[in-house]
Amino acid sequence: MGSIHLHEKKFNLYIKEKEILERVNQLAQAISKDYRGKNLILIGIMNGAVIFLSDLCRKIELPLSIASMKASSYQGMKSSGTVQIESLLNLDLKDKHLLLVEDIVDTGKTLFELKDYLFKAKPASIGIATLLFKPQAFEYNYHLNYVGFEIPNKFVVGYGLDFDELGRNLPDIYQLDTTY
């Protein structure tokens, strides 16, 4: 499918499912190597990371735990500038190796706030895996350990990413058509 329409906006195919899944496999291999012998907890940042988390965790060749948090700053197609952390499953994080799994990092504010929140639980480490990264929008200088794709600072949907809750179920990633 070359383009789709959501909420009367046109989006063009940007990254095909096959490319996404190949990159997820590569990230899983790197994570498996880096966390071998460590007590790993993947923490999916919901709702956007649900599909990435699901595909990623099944390819990681290690025993691991999975948890989720809900944190958001988006309203429509723009960040509100305020991060709301809504929940964390009740797990003991002390001395565990946490890997935050995010669908997309743009300004970086959400993950900055989440890391600050999680450091209070005294984990052994906190790493970050993101499917998409917008370096042009990034406002912080913390390290992203695993990046699927670097993309321009344009709005995207699909593979868990949404536009006002539509598009998460699309297997490919689509970019907003600004000429439409």
Image: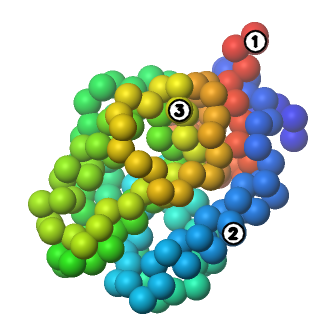
* Residue marked by disc 1: 180
Q: Tag 1: Cα neighbours inside 10 Å, few (<14), some, or many (≥20)?
A: few
In the image, residue 146 sits, relative to residue 10, either above or below, namely below
| Camera-nearest residue between 100 and 155 | 100
Q: Secondary structure at mark 1?
A: loop
How many angstroms separate mark 1 from mark 3 (CA)? 25 Å
Q: Is residue 170 left or right of residue 84?
A: right
How many angstroms separate mark 1 from mark 2 (CA)? 34 Å
In the image, residue 81 sits, relative to residue 41, either above or below, namely above
Q: Tag 3: Cα neighbours inside 10 Å, few (<14), some, or many (≥20)?
A: some
- Residue type, numbered disc 2: Asn
- Residue type, numbered disc 3: Pro
**Which mark, by number, is residue 25?**
2
What residue sits 79% from the left and 54% below the top? 19
| Among the two numbered marks 3 and 2 on one chain, the one whose residue lies closer to the N terminus | 2
Residue 64 x, y percent position in the rendering? 43, 83
How many angstroms separate mark 3 from mark 2 (CA)? 22 Å
| The image quarter in which residue 56 lies | bottom right
